[in-house]
């Protein structure tokens, strides 16, 4: 980071995701004059279609987290429910595999446990 400071302000790195994705303010303003709307989020660099897909994915995960959170009493029950939904054994969830479906289940489990149930990291659930 210290090396980058000496480069000063770089115009190609200024602006939110929409500005950079479209190539600058002139393109953004041209679209606005035409009445076109493009999905954007200043935290994300990507096309409108990519951002729409990302938002849909996040909303889907939030709905799943809320559904799980309502009916779960403890971490063991949460693990059972997540494994049942994903067609996994609890041992697979606990092993920390990077296989896509196992990693997804682990991510859902952790999000619900931490954000939904207020569990702190290092709770001892993983052994």
Image: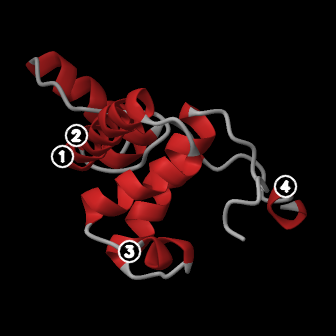
> Element under label 4?
helix
User: Can you say whether 53 is above or below 87 in the image?
Assistant: above
Q: Is residue 101 left or right of residue 78?
A: left
> Element under label 2?
helix
What label sits on residue 89 in the rendered view?
Answer: 3
The percent coordinates of residue 104 (x first, y second) are: 39, 64
Front one among 29 and 72: 72
The percent coordinates of residue 91 (x first, y second) are: 49, 78
What label sits on residue 5 in the rendered view?
Answer: 4
Which scheme is used to colour this image of the protein?
A: secondary structure
Question: Which residue is tagged 1?
Answer: 49
Give the Cα separation between the discs numbered 2 and 3: 33 Å
Q: Are marks 1 and 2 in contact (CB under 8 Å)?
A: yes
Query: Within 10 Å of the Cα at label 1, are there few (<14), some (14-19), or many (20+) other Cα atoms?
Result: few
Question: Which residue is tagged 2?
Answer: 52
Name which of mark 3 and mark 4 comes first in the sequence.
4
Name which of mark 4 and mark 2 comes first in the sequence.
4
Q: What residue is drawn where x is 33% and y is 72%?
A: 88
Give the Cα separation between the discs numbered 3 and 4: 50 Å
Quadrant position of the C terminus in the picture? bottom right
């Amino acid at each position: 980071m210290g090396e980058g400071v000496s480069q000063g302000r770089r115009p190609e790195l200024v602006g939110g995701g929409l500005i950079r994705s479209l190539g600058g303010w002139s393109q953004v303003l041209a679209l606005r004059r035409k009445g076109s709307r493009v999905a954007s989020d200043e935290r994300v660099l990507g096309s409108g279609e990519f951002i729409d897909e990302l938002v849909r994915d996040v909303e889907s995960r939030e709905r799943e987290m809320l559904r799980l959170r309502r009916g779960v009493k403890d971490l063991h029950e949460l693990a059972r429910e997540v494994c049942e939904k994903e067609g996994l054994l609890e041992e697979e969830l606990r092993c920390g595999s990077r296989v896509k479906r196992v990693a997804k289940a682990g991510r859902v489990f952790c999000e619900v446990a931490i954000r939904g149930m207020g569990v702190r990291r290092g709770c001892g659930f993983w052994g």
